[in-house]
């Protein structure tokens, strides 16, 4: 588990809160699950295919005393999403935090991009964010407390060759974040997005040769660790962030500045 | 068992106090949700959620408060609700008395019809129907 912050009152920062994290079995998602659990939240996370990896995380975190569950979910299927939210309410009685992390990429140059690749990415990334947000909103409004944190990307701001579909999906998530934030602010529900640049995940590890070149373009001189993105999400999920809403927060080591090193 | 109007009012008042953050004594049958209690668009949904939980009923969206009516050009013209719009309002909100509003159907006056008493009447009708079923 990552570093835990114990407040002066002896309580962990997210103690008593219940979080749902979509796509929590690997990469940034698993770091988010670990971080929220270490901060005292009860966490339900979803996985699509990586059951083994998801169950391993559950066992590890439970052994450390955390309350964690994993559930299979297809985030494009409204019924599947509803089951996760209902399951969470049944088990823990509330939902305080939603992290819309699950998403896919199907990169390719636009000139050769099939309609299927466009729809797949938009329907999963934007559709999944819509369905999960929709499923928790009523509960959050009712309890007058909630944190929705959407996973965006630096490319939503900068664009990226070969990622027209992915960049469009993340741009839509940014706009969705702002619109929903405006609707829910008076009900004590904040909605923000986190837009990472390059993060050291397995996916990036697989193209390490390329990664060497990319590092030179990052002012901070390195990729982000998944735990650093998780820490930002954990802060946005906390009470301390109650006055931050409708923001898309870049966490990119300065990459979007396009500064020369 | 069928609730009395007073019991319904008390339930409605609790919902409004929780949803809008107003005090109990601000809520009377004549209170306008918008003018007197400061309700905004999201509050109408919040109120519906709370009424559903309190009274154990399902309120179809648009049943208690109309949705999307003002964005239909057939129903709104020059800042007024058209006759077709008024007919639609009466059809959707059969529990509301439109006599006064119909005399001067300005869009700006539409929020006046949403009173605490109107919610109580709606629920009285709805829960009575439920009891009969």
Image (cartoon, rainbow, N blue to C red):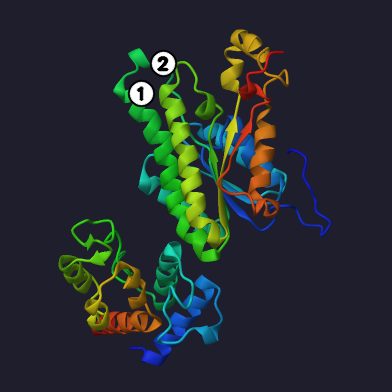
Q: How many marks?
A: 2
Q: Are marks 1 and 2 in contact (CB under 8 Å)?
A: yes
Of all residues shown, which one is farthest toward the front? B78
The residue at which mark 1 appears reads as: A117
Residue density around tag 2, few if under 14, some if 14–19, many if 20 or more, within 10 Å: some
- Mark 2 chain: A
- Residue B13 in the image, given as x and y percentages of width and height: 47, 82
- Residue A250 in the image, given as x and y percentages of width and height: 62, 33
Residue at 56% across / 28% down in the picture?
A154
- Mark 1 chain: A
Residue at 64% across / 27% down in the picture?
A252
Look at the image and tell me in which quarter the C terminus of chain A lies: top right
Residue B95 occupies which quadrant of the picture?
bottom left
Residue A67 appears in the picture as rendered: no
- Residue A247 in the image, given as x and y percentages of width and height: 58, 43
The residue at which mark 2 appears reads as: A108
């Amino acid at each position: 588990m990552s570093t835990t912050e114990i407040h002066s009152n002896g309580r962990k920062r997210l103690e008593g809160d219940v979080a749902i994290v979509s796509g929590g079995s690997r990469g940034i998602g698993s770091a988010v699950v670990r971080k929220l659990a270490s901060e005292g939240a009860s966490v339900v996370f979803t996985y699509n295919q990586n059951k083994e990896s998801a169950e391993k995380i559950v066992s590890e975190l439970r052994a450390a005393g955390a309350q964690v569950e994993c559930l299979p979910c297809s985030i494009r299927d409204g019924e599947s999403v509803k089951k996760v939210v209902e399951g969470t309410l049944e088990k823990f009685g509330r939902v305080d935090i939603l992290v819309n992390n699950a998403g896919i990429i199907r990169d390719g140059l636009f000139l050769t991009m099939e309609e299927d690749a466009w729809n797949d990415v938009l329907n999963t990334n934007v559709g999944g964010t819509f369905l999960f947000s929709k499923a928790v909103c009523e509960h959050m409004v009712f309890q007058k407390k909630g944190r929705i944190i959407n996973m965006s990307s630096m490319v939503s701001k900068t664009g990226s060759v070969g990622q027209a579909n992915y960049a469009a999906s993340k741009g839509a998530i940014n706009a969705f974040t702002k619109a929903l934030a405006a609707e829910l602010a008076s009900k004590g529900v904040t909605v923000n997005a986190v837009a990472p640049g390059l993060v050291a995940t397995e996916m990036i590890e697989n193209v390490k040769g390329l990664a060497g070149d990319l590092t030179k373009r990052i002012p901070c001189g390195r990729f982000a660790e998944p735990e650093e993105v998780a820490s930002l999400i954990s802060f946005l999920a906390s009470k301390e962030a109650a006055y931050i809403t409708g923001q898309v927060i870049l966490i990119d080591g300065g990459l979007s500045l396009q500064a020369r090193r | 068992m069928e609730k009395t109007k007073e019991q319904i009012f008390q339930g409605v008042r609790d919902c409004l106090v929780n949803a809008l953050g107003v005090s109990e004594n601000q809520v009377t049958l004549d209170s306008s949700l918008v003018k007197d209690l400061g309700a905004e668009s999201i509050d109408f949904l919040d109120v519906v959620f709370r009424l559903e939980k309190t009274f154990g009923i399902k309120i179809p969206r648009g049943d208690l408060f109309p949705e999307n009516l003002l964005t239909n050009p057939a129903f709104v013209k020059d800042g007024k609700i058209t006759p077709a719009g008024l007919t639609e309002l009466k059809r959707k909100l059969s529990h509301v008395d439109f006599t006064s509003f119909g005399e001067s159907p300005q869009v700006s006056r539409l929020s006046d019809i949403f009173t605490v008493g109107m919610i109580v009447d709606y629920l009285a009708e709805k829960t009575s129907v439920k009891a009969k079923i």
